[in-house]
Amino acid sequence: MKKRLAVLGSTGSIGRQTLDVVRAFPDRLEVTALAAGSNRALLEEQSREFKPRFVSVAGAPGYIPLHEIAAHPDVDLVVIATAGKAGLLPTLAAIRAGKAVALANKEVLVMAGEIIMSEARKFKVEIRPIDSEHSALWQCLQGESTSTISRIILTASGGAFRDRPIEALSQVTAEEALRHPTWNMGKKVTIDSANLMNKGFEVIEAHWLFGVPFDKIKVVLHPASIVHSMVELADGSTKAQLGVPDMRLPIQYALSYPERWGNPSLPKLDFARPQSLTFAPIDMARYPCLMLAFEAGRSGGTYPAALSAADEIAVAFFLEGRIGFLDIPRLLEHVLEEHRSIARPSLDDILEADTRARESAQRWCLR
């Protein structure tokens, strides 16, 4: 039987690449629902091609809320390819309806990791990570007990400015920050990659997805983006997952799991070609956003939700040219200092923290 997909955020980078995978397997995958924010022209084009039962555009007449799409009986697997907090409620709705979730939205677990994972266990639902790093860890840990993990190692490309002198970072532009050296991604995650905020979010995600404490999570610089992540086990063995930096690879695995499907259109590593796989420690002076994410994750409560919300505002203002690149960590630090965390938050507490952090970030930007 074909797997019936709901692709939420279908016009974004992950959504478009998800549909590339669907095109390769018309006998195994079908699109039941498409939803997008504002790119109506592309959504209409996608709808003509895939003929989904449901099409939803935010704010348009006949708009179907994402959480209703995610829970619909005609959907087997929900791809959460939205950005920011828009992915939170549909993820919860899918889980509570017993749907498998292919999760690309970092903020869902950053904001509400404890609630999401608790509900997933309660309803016996799989959270299939689409992030290349978490997909790598997921694959490396199959057949392993989490009790045997010595540490997990996330790799980071270093983003657009990894070789730029620190003293020059105050002058960089949004256009420069969007030139990622290895990955083709949406604007927000590309900016987050330039200052390693995305890696900080991935640390928090990994903590919740795999039940690993923060002191067992390490980040290393790996410019080639070939080794996507590693797991060091108790006996000293290390497992790594390697692949060409192409998001269609982890997307396809999330859609095909527990099977692996042959896809000749996906790139393969050529080990006969000379290449170098180098690793280096992270310079925290260059990447203060990563340090802030570790601190927010360890502090717990609503601190990660506040960090996530403030980052959305900061990145938007940077892209508009209203603040500088180095203002992003300054803004985040201010919001975290001002934030009053709730230790064991409810969903309403998390959404309230998100609102308060956005207001705090906007005040800082407009000061």
Image: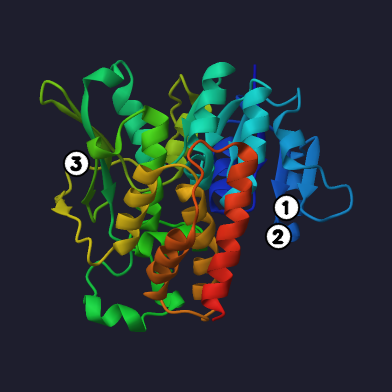
> Which circle, 1 or 3, is nearer the viewer?
1
Amino acid type shown at disc 3: Phe
Residue under numbered circle 1: 43
Mark 2 or 3: in front is 2
Q: Is residue 43 above or below residue 132?
A: below
From what the image shows, is residue 111 above or below residue 356? Answer: above
Residue, x 26% and y 47% (percent of image)? 155
Image height of 168 relative to 161, above or below: below
x%, y% of residue 168? 27, 82
Q: Are marks 2 and 1 in contact (CB under 8 Å)?
A: yes
Q: Which residue is mark 3?
A: 271
Q: CA distance from mark 2 to mark 3?
A: 40 Å
Residue at screen point 24% across, 81% down: 167
- Front residue of 102/288: it is 288
Q: Amino acid at mark 2?
A: Asn
Residue 82 in sight from this viewpoint: no
Q: Quadrant of residue 267?
A: top left
Q: Give the mark, 2 or 3, whose residue is nearer the N terminus.
A: 2
